[in-house]
Image (cartoon, rainbow, N blue to C red):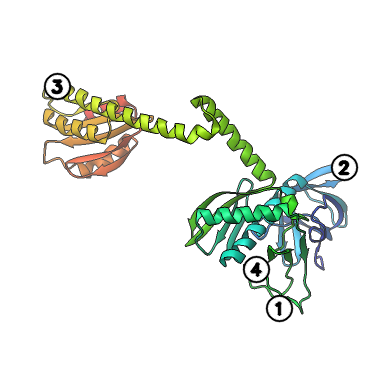
């Protein structure tokens, strides 16, 4: 059993990319190996941030480190290969990913600090993922307030302020003002940005706010009675912009429109599409009326498809069709790869609400309704639907 805490090199230098260390222990943990070193630059999972990716070099061979966890004051690395105790290894951090996370995490501190100073709201949740950074606050923010914070946050970035991470003297700690989601009394590490924020945090950060590059709040939503912000900072913000720029250019080419005209063009398309759908539905009603007029009385069930029918047209088709059958009239219209249905009957003894589950189970459907009409969707092919009701 190993003794003593792991020396946390990531606390001392968040820009350290490679290091050497001695293996203090290596124990089997399920299908993997749990390795403790005397020191490490790998940041373990914690505080809403995933563990650093990277690998060990042992005798010239790379061994992937797929997880890092903090247990008490010890840091454990998880690998798929065993490494002998007292062996000296080299560790290599995936610094591109580390730096991306540092940009986003420092950016979050800037935003959260400004929200706290401006509106008095606290950060009650944080998650730094591969594609998204989310922050939850215990107060409601409007979009205009969020834009105000975003502007102030980027001004703090452009001011190139120092980001200082340190462990304060336990004697002076009670007199310091800082944000913290936990009630910490010892081992408190503060990350301070002058005039912007001071927050308890265990994660690596950039050295200056300028290295955050850019802070972009891409979305807001209500969450737990407060507000959730979605952030992109630094390289993540650039990648997000690139993706949206690509989409905007594609849409512009399809619409033969400039980027600042896209919203107006899409709105015009929606209105035109609504008009066309309305006209199609009215034409469907006329087709339905003509079809039902020419339909002879059917003994049993009848399945019929009315193309381009909206809800009103399909209901009128179903209500008119039930007068033409002694059994069930199954009115269908295309919906994606399947059909929307309305099923009716003029026979009051047939309680359709009780049969809905049977029909849905047989024809990959969903839906229900009342005794005189049920509606929903069938995913089964038309041939199967017709055969099923022919055999009933």
Q: Position of residue 300 (x, y in %)?
A: 15, 28
Question: Are the residues flagged by discs 4 and 3 in contact, CB closer than 8 Å?
Answer: no
Write down the residue under mark 3. Answer: 295
Residue carrying label 2: 60
Q: How far from the left and from the top, in percent, is residue 236?
A: 66, 44
From the image, tell me which residue sits under label 1: 174
The answer to whether any part of residue 104 appears in the image is yes
**Lower sequence index among marks 1 and 3:** 1
Q: Distance between the residues labelled 4 and 1?
A: 12 Å
Classify 95 as above or below 312: below
Q: Earlier in the sequence, mark 4 or mark 1?
A: 1
Question: Which residue is nearer to you in this view: 56 or 288?
Answer: 288
Q: Which of marks 3 and 2 is nearer the N terminus?
A: 2
Residue 43 position, x and y percent, is 74, 56
In the picture provided, is 39 more to the left or to the right than 219? right
Single out the mark in the foreground, 1 or 3.
Answer: 1
- Indicate which disc, 2 or 4, sits on the residue closer to the N terminus: 2
Image point (68%, 70%), residue name: 178
Marks 2 and 1 sit apart, C-alpha to C-alpha, by 49 Å
């Amino acid at each position: 059993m190993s003794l003593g805490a792991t020396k946390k090199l990531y606390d001392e230098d968040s820009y350290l990319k490679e290091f050497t260390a001695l293996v203090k222990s290596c124990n089997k943990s399920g299908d993997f190996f749990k390795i403790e070193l005397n020191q490490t630059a790998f940041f373990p999972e914690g505080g809403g941030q995933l563990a650093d990716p990277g690998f060990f070099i042992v005798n010239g061979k790379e061994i992937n480190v797929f997880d890092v966890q903090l247990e008490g004051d010890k840091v454990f690395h998880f690998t798929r290969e065993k490494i002998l105790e007292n062996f000296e290894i080299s560790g290599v951090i995936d610094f591109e990913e580390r730096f991306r996370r540092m940009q986003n995490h420092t950016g979050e501190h800037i935003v959260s600090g400004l929200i706290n100073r401006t509106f008095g709201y606290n950060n009650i949740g944080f998650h730094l993922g591969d594609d998204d950074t989310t922050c939850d606050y215990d107060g409601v923010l409007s979009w205009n307030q969020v834009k105000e914070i975003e502007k102030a946050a980027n001004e703090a970035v452009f001011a190139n302020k120092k980001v200082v991470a340190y462990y304060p003297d336990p004697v002076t700690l009670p007199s310091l003002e800082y944000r913290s989601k936990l009630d910490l009394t010892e081992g408190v590490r503060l990350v301070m940005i002058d005039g912007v924020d001071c927050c308890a945090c265990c994660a690596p950060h950039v050295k200056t706010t300028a290295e955050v590059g850019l802070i972009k709040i891409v979305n807001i939503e209500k969450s737990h009675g407060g507000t959730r912000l979605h952030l992109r900072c630094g390289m993540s913000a650039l990648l997000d912009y690139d993706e949206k720029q690509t989409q905007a250019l594609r849409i512009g080419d399809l619409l033969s429109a400039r980027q600042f005209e896209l919203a107006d063009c899409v709105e015009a398309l929606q209105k035109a599409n609504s008009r066309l759908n309305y006209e199609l539905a009215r034409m469907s009603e006329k087709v339905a009326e003509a079809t039902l007029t020419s339909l002879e009385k059917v003994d049993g069930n009848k399945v019929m498809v009315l193309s381009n029918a909206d809800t009103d047209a399909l209901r009128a088709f179903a209500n008119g069709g039930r007068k033409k059958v002694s059994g069930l009239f199954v009115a269908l219209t295309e919906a994606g790869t399947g059909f929307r249905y309305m099923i009716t009957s003029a026979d009051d003894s047939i309680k359709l609400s009780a049969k809905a589950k049977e029909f849905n189970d047989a024809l990959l459907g969903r839906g229900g309704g009342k005794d005189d009409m049920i509606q929903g969707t069938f995913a089964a092919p038309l041939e199967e639907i017709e055969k099923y009701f022919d055999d009933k």
